Image (cartoon, rainbow, N blue to C red):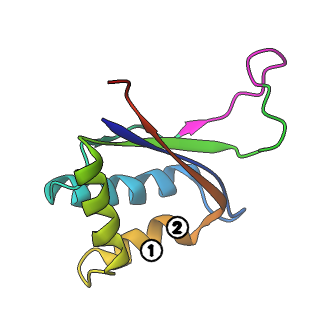
Amino acid sequence: MLHLHTSFDLSSDVKIDDYRAVLDEFSADMLAKGLILSTGPVMERCKHPVMDTDEERTHRYFFIMSFADREQCDAAVRHIQAADPESGPIHRAIYKDIISPIFSCWADPE
């Protein structure tokens, strides 16, 4: 399995519950199209003096989106890059209110 870890901040005028609703809509669309396995909840960072040592990134939120394999992940990327008229607006909606996103992709050990 592959996992996309997305860390981000939100524009000051965006409420986290509103953002979660838009992400849920996007995830449901991608799931219905067979382009993801799941999207975890949007989590809020807990600054802890021992358990959070990343001082380079100060992002407040993150979520993880999971894919069955590289093929599904690549299909999702192609779909998003194609700016599908049906789901393009949903995808743009989840990114229009975030600030300085960081994406990293992780694979389960084989």
Residue 10 among those drawn in magenta: no
Residue at x-position 84% and y-position 18%: 49
Counting from the top left corner in percent of width and height, residue 78 is at: 30, 70
| Label 2 sits on residue | 95
Q: Residue furthest top?
A: 50
Residue type pointed to by label 2: Tyr
Q: Going by the image, does 44 lie left or right of 80?
A: right
User: SS of the residue at dot 2?
Assistant: helix
In the image, 27 versus 22, the foreground residue is 27
Q: Residue furthest front?
A: 110
- Tag shown at residue 71: none
User: SS of the residue at dot 1?
Assistant: helix
Q: CA distance from mark 2 to mark 1?
A: 5 Å
User: Residue 40, located in which quarter of the rendered image?
Assistant: top left
Residue type pointed to by label 1: Arg
Residue at x-position 31% and y-position 53%: 73
From the viewer's perspective, is residue 102 above or below residue 107? below
**Magenta segment, prevailing SS (helix, strand or loop):** loop
Counting from the top left corner in percent of width and height, residue 7 is at: 61, 47
Split into 4 quadrants, where in the image is the C terminus?
top left
Tell me, yes or no, if residue 37 can be seen here: yes
In the image, 3 versus 12, the foreground residue is 3
Residue at x-position 84% and y-position 36%: 55
Q: Going by the image, does 101 lie left or right of 41?
A: right
Q: Going by the image, does 20 lie left or right of 57?
A: left
Residue at x-position 78% and y-position 44%: 58
In the image, 17 versus 92, the foreground residue is 92
Counting from the top left corner in percent of width and height, residue 93 is at: 45, 71
| Label 1 sits on residue | 92
From the viewer's perspective, is residue 83 above or below residue 44? below
Q: Dot 2: few (<14), some (14–19), or many (≥20) neighbours within 10 Å?
A: some
Find the magenta span and give its range: 43-52
